[in-house]
């Protein structure tokens, strides 16, 4: 159950960032994190305490440069060098529109103002919600938060 917005802390500068709570990072997913789904109730409790909530979502196109399947003869967890540096190759995960890319259904943060999709550029991986792996391509999150104070 989410706390009514009228009962949330009044500091408009506070924000909660919820990062990559997607099925491919949950048990049974392509890049499973052991007990990752156990975080959902905690995130829901935290989310109920913030007026400003942003969710980040890995959102890769098919054939993404970080997928081992995009490189003949390579396997997941191999490393290659790309123009921006070393790149670990991953199993295909969080493919746009797939079940694995969906945010966990039990997340109960209906007042989140933004879902930031990252990793959308087929030629650059993304680990941060602020900047892509090339360390120069910004996601827009810093600007969004700045504009909101």
Image (tube, helix red, strand yellow):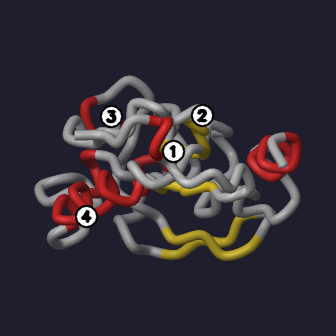
Under circle 4, the secondary element is helix
Under circle 3, the secondary element is loop
Residue sitting at x 87%, y 41% = 147
Mark 3 and mark 1 in contact (Cβ < 8 Å)?
A: no
Residue sitting at x 41%, y 61% = 90
3D distance between C-alphas at marks 1 and 3:
12 Å
Q: Earlier in the sequence, mark 2 or mark 1?
A: 1
Q: Quadrant of residue 108?
A: top left
3D distance between C-alphas at marks 4 and 1:
14 Å
Query: Which sits in the foreground, 71 or 51?
Result: 51
In the drawing, does residue 39 fall left or right of residue 131? left
The residue that mark 2 highlights is 114
3D distance between C-alphas at marks 2 and 1:
6 Å
Q: Earlier in the sequence, mark 2 or mark 3?
A: 3
Question: Percent from the top left, x then y, of residue 27?
Answer: 14, 60
User: Mark 3 Cα within 10 Å, few/some/many (few <14, many 20+)?
Assistant: some
Q: Residue 102: which disc? A: 3
In the drawing, does residue 28 fall left or right of residue 101? left
Question: Percent from the top left, x then y, of residue 126?
Answer: 62, 56
Mark 1 and mark 2 in contact (Cβ < 8 Å)?
A: yes
Under circle 2, the secondary element is strand
The residue that mark 1 highlights is 55
Question: Percent from the top left, x then y, of residue 64?
Answer: 54, 43
């Amino acid at each position: 159950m989410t706390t009514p917005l009228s009962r949330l802390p009044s500091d408009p500068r506070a924000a909660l960032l919820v990062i990559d709570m997607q099925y491919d990072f949950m048990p049974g997913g392509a890049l499973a994190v052991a007990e990752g789904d156990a975080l959902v109730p905690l995130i829901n409790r935290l989310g109920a305490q913030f007026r400003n909530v942003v969710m980040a979502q890995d959102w890769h196109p098919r054939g993404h440069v970080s997928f081992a399947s995009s490189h003949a003869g390579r396997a997941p967890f191999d490393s290659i060098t790309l123009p921006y540096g070393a790149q670990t190759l991953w199993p295909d995960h969080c493919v746009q529109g797939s079940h694995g890319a969906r945010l966990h259904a039990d997340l109960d943060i209906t007042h989140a103002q933004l879902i930031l999709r990252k990793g959308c550029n087929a030629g650059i991986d993304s680990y941060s919600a602020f900047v892509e792996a090339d360390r120069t391509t910004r996601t827009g999150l810093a600007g969004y938060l700045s504009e909101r104070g």
